[in-house]
Image (cartoon, coloured by chain):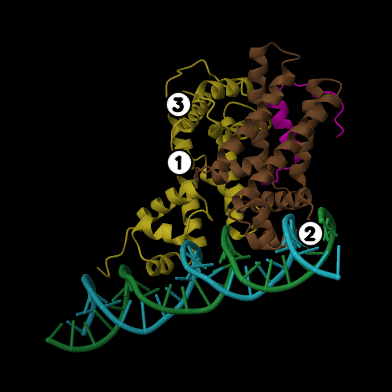
Chain colours: A yellow, B brown, C cyan, D green
Amino acid sequence: MARVQFDRDEVIRDCTQLFWQQGFSGASMQDVVKATGLKPGSLYLAFGSKEGLYQAALEYYAGQSRETIRQTLDTAPSVGEGICRQLRRMVAEAGQADYCSCFLVKSQLELASSGGDLLHSIRDYLSTIEDLYAEYLGRDYPPEQARQYAASLILHIYGIRVYGYLGRGPDAMLSALQTGLPWLPWEFEPAV
Amino acid sequence: MARVQFDRDEVIRDCTQLFWQQGFSGASMQDVVKATGLKPGSLYLAFGSKEGLYQAALEYYAGQSRETIRQTLDTAPSVGEGICRQLRRMVAEAGQADYCSCFLVKSQLELASSGGDLLHSIRDYLSTIEDLYAEYLGRDYPPEQARQYAASLILHIYGIRVYGYLGRGPDAMLSALQTGLPWLPWEFEPAV
DNA sequence: ACATGACTTGAATGAACGTTCAAGTTTATT
DNA sequence: AATAAACTTGAACGTTCATTCAAGTCATGT
């Protein structure tokens, strides 16, 4: 089947799912071979190394995250309600059986001590997402307050990404979010 | 030097530091051998496996954490001020060069997909800590509110454990904490 | 003084790891 | 039809992994 190049995006999607679930060390290249259906040679020609593959997965995930946030906040009646929708979605995700937190958060914690190049990317992606929220909040609040609210929001989001594993149920989490983020318009549309 | 048994607690302390920094997959048994000065045979006789060693490290860390919390909250003028001290300490930790978050949080995220026995312990330890805060808050608030405040507090603590890696500086983090936890007595003694 | 038992030692084990590359297969060009 | 280029293939590489165990060393009970 040579000369029929594989679908790069599809491979990256498969890798993202695998790495997201298993982590960098937890997923072996053999697992990647199995997940993508590609042979080692092809993977290494296209991505150079396991790290290159992980990098591509991170980039894909970060892009998807940004896109989802933008779409949710642009679609919602207001920025505040968009953020509420986003948070409710995260809480709902945490309730699913195959919940695996946030790929960027997991990667940050796993690779923090490695000091590799991946770490810079992860930090960039996470910072960009905080900046994105701050940008949207800047429409409704003065810059100083927008930044402060964004930081508080991000703190809560990171919190969910860990707390979601404890299986305390969505009610406890939503109640905790409403306690810590009282400036959000929680009263509107509790539906997803 | 046979018949001179090694100091079990000291070995566990060394392992805790190693696993805390590097993670379960990230730290090899060779690393453990180097860190503890023991030979593989001794380690396996005493702890059975790498997992057993990790379990011991988790237990030690969780015990230390509980003890620190209890001591801080018992010593402080009030529960609220004790919690503030605890949070300020976490923010200060996050500023250090060798910051490595919370061992339990890191372990939860790394091992979530493994489904091993370790996972149950980790969840137990994390839950116990939340319960501990709830217990102390129960002194100042009715049960319902105490539980809600504890959940919100834990969400913030988990948030710090991730946010701390982004290197935004202590001021941004403290400001975010004060935004999300306005019911705490932040006005008292900003010193550590 | 000696035998027993407790503990340590560290080389060895097979499996799994990330990675490579010579050979094979198909499409594009001539 | 033949050649070149592009891409895939999968066995094989050396390394590192967690783990084992026969041999060694010392404190203790007699």
> Which residue is under mark 1?
A67
- Numbered disc 1: what chain? A
Eyeballing the image, is A130 above or below A190?
below
Q: Which mark is residue B3?
A: 2
Label 3, label 2: how far apart the Cα atoms are: 71 Å
Task: Identify which residue is drawn at 52% across, 20% down.
Answer: A171
Task: Identify which residue is drawn at 73% across, 49% down.
Answer: B12
| Residue B53 visible to the viewer | yes
Q: Is residue B11 left or right of residue B143?
A: right
x%, y% of residue A31? 42, 57
Label 2, label 1: how far apart the Cα atoms are: 63 Å
Q: Nearer the viewer, mark 3 or mark 2?
A: 2
**The C terminus of chain B lies in which quarter of the figure?**
top right
x%, y% of residue B141? 72, 13
Q: Nearer the viewer, residue B12 or B149?
A: B12
Q: Amino acid at mark 1?
A: Glu
Badge 3: how crowded within 10 Å, few (<14), some, or many (20+)? Answer: some
Residue stretch in magenta: B165-192
x%, y% of residue B29? 63, 60
Secondary structure at numbered mark 2: loop
> Which residue is under mark 3?
A76
